[in-house]
């Protein structure tokens, strides 16, 4: 582990850079995006970078070479190259908990032939035993289903891999995910399963997360009651695997010691994907494909570490995000993948961005003088076009938008794929160009409407346009590309945290709510636990229902 000191930026230079960028925003906002794009015939190649199989085209961003120079200067002032080096060499980046963030090390270590990472080696052996039908349940039958129980970072990345790599599924073992403490989530899953052939993989870094503990306990009860006297506790233990950084707590839950896979303390919860937490994904796609997935992420790590700032995918993506949120009033970020397989990508990235950078204080505890992480959401294309894209085209709010499109899918149905690609490009183009009054009038005239009718309708059809977006293009969604894409966004988040001087690796804000929920649960169960008057009114209603 490298314990060298985190590079500290020069405050005065930093303030000057921020002011220069504010002035730049005023300058460039006066130029319509369509003019910026049309005036420069080489814009599409000038504002495009490509590596590790991913092309980022940012020609439709409100930037020119002057803007990019200023953003890159800010990055240098904030000592971004030194900060990236410090992070990737295992320096302390989580200042409040005094810890490094070692998820990149984990993927590199497993790929190294001299030093394969042991957590993944054990995961590999278990995945093979489950996959080959050697892992037997209490009645001697091989496993047909895995229920992965976990929440937040302990599920989102794994769910993304399992769904995004559906073309690579190798196993007959079906994977299900249960997160919500609402019993409906577990019940609807269990209703489809046979207890004799179901394996539960309980993933929790802390092994104290209330939702995961309760779901795991209820799953165990379901199994015990189905097995009846046929099965001993030892047999039941064959149906539970835990992945955690707290093996002693998992053991107290009666999970057999040999079924507990460790997770490194220095791998943050939202990066759990890069640990044995991915067992369910490894079973689904096979270890070779999982290894290719790690390889893609590792290639992005190398790109991030070695590529000059102006050609560096995560750096440019991070700078553009800061540009949009801090200088161009876009406080919401949309992730719009035009690929059904990437339908869980927005929700995965949402946690990575918002839990990492949803902070208001800098490393030294002083207030950040501007906004930090945007609100992140998204939906697979083209579904979003039929719900919220209206808001993007004609609403009042500025949004930062990333379109992600795959040129080929695993099917031999070109009509479907070309519809996806066309819609993605059309949305990005329309947002940028809009539809002005003259265009609208011309369009309405072709529909044989009267002049009065055209004038009446025109204001409703006009779309101001001038809305920027990024376009990320990949040819095929391979395990390698998926790994690179996930790592690209993770590193983008790190870049932003360096520019804002905040800690991207803690999440203290979520703790308080957990304590209050525990108190209110006690109140719901009848003990006089503290809760405020508004909560108390619902507690009393809830209790009344059960006393009647
Ligand atoms: O409550 C937030 C959080 O701690 C996330 O950071 C984490 O991904 C999730 O809960 C699950 O935590 P655990 O893996 O400890 O169950």
Image (cartoon, rainbow, N blue to C red):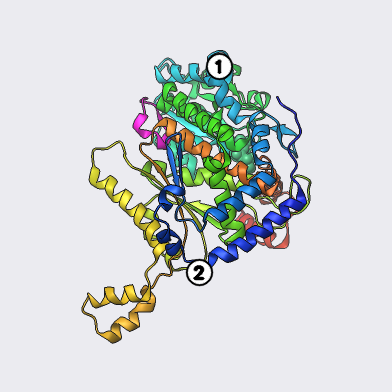
Mark 1 in CB contact with mark 2 (< 8 angstroms): no
Q: In which quarter of the image is the N terminus?
A: top right
- The residue singled out by tag 2 in the image is 396
- The residue singled out by tag 1 in the image is 116
Residue 175, magenta (yes or no): yes
Determine the residue positioned at 41% across, 65% down. 390
Residue span colored magenta: 162-177
Compared with 537, 409 (above or below) is above
Compared with 534, 421 (above or below) is above
Q: How crowded is mark 2: few (under 14 residues within 10 Å), some or many (20 or more)?
A: few
Q: What kind of element bears circle 1?
A: loop
Q: Quadrant of residue 385?
A: bottom left
Which of the pair 121/370 is nearer the observer? 370
Q: Dividing the image into four equal quarters, which quarter contains ligand 1? A: top right
Image-based side of 178 in relation to 105, left or right: left
Q: Which of marks 1 and 2 is nearer the N terminus?
A: 1
């Amino acid at each position: 582990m490298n314990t060298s000191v985190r590079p500290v930026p020069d405050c005065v230079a930093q303030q000057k850079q921020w002011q220069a960028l504010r002035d730049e925003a005023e300058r460039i906002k006066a130029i319509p995006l369509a003019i910026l794009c049309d005036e420069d015939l080489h814009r599409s190649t000038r504002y495009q970078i490509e590596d590790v199989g991913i092309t980022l085209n940012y020609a439709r961003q409100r930037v020119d070479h002057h803007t990019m120079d200023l953003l890159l200067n800010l990055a240098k002032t904030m000592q971004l190259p030194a900060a990236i080096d410090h992070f990737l060499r295992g320096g302390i980046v989580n200042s409040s908990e005094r810890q490094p963030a070692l998820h990149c090390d984990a993927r590199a270590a497993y790929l190294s032939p001299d030093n394969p990472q042991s957590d993944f080696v054990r995961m590999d052996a278990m995945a093979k035993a489950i996959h080959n039908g050697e892992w037997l349940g209490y009645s001697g039958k091989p496993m047909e289903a895995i229920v992965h129980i976990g929440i937040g970072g302990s599920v989102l990345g794994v769910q993304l891999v399992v769904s995004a790599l559906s073309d690579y599924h190798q196993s007959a073992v079906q994977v299900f995910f249960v997160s919500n403490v609402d019993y409906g989530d577990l019940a609807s899953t269990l209703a489809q399963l046979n207890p004799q052939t179901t394996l539960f993989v309980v993933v929790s870094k802390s092994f104290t997360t209330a939702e995961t503990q309760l779901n795991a306990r209820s799953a165990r009860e379901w199994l015990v009651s189905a097995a009846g006297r046929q099965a001993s506790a030892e047999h039941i233990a064959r149906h539970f695997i835990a992945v955690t950084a707290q093996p002693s707590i998992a053991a107290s839950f009666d999970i057999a010691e040999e079924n507990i896979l460790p997770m490194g303390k220095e791998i943050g919860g939202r990066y759990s994907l890069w640990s044995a937490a991915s067992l369910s994904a490894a079973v689904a796609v096979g270890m070779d494909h999982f290894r290719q997935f790690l390889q893609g992420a590792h290639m992005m790590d190398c790109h991030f570490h070695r590529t000059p700032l102006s050609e560096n995918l995560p750096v440019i993506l991070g700078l553009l995000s800061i540009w949009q949120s801090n200088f161009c009033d876009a406080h919401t970020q949309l992730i719009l993948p035009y690929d059904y397989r990437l339908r869980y990508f927005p929700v995965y990235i949402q946690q990575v961005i918002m839990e990492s950078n949803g902070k208001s204080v800098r490393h030294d505890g002083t207030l950040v003088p501007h906004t930090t992480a945007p609100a992140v959401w998204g939906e697979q294309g083209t579904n979003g076009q039929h719900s919220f894209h209206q808001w993007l085209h004609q609403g009042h709010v500025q949004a930062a938008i990333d379109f992600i499109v795959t040129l080929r899918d695993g099917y031999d149905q070109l009509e479907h794929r070309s519809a996806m690609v066309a819609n993605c490009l059309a949305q990005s183009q329309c947002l940028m160009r809009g539809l002005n009054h003259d265009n609208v009038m011309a369009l309405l005239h072709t529909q044989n409407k009267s002049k009065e009718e055209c004038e009446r309708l025109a204001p409703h059809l006009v779309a101001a346009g001038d809305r920027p977006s990024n376009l990320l293009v990949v040819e095929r969604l391979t395990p390698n590309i998926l790994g690179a894409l996930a790592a690209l966004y993770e590193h983008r988040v790190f870049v932003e945290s360096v520019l804002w001087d905040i800690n991207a690796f803690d999440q203290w804000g979520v703790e308080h709510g957990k304590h209050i929920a525990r108190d209110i649960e006690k109140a719901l169960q009848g003990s006089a636990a503290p809760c405020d008057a508004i909560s108390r009114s619902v507690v009393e209603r809830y209790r009344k229902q059960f006393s009647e």
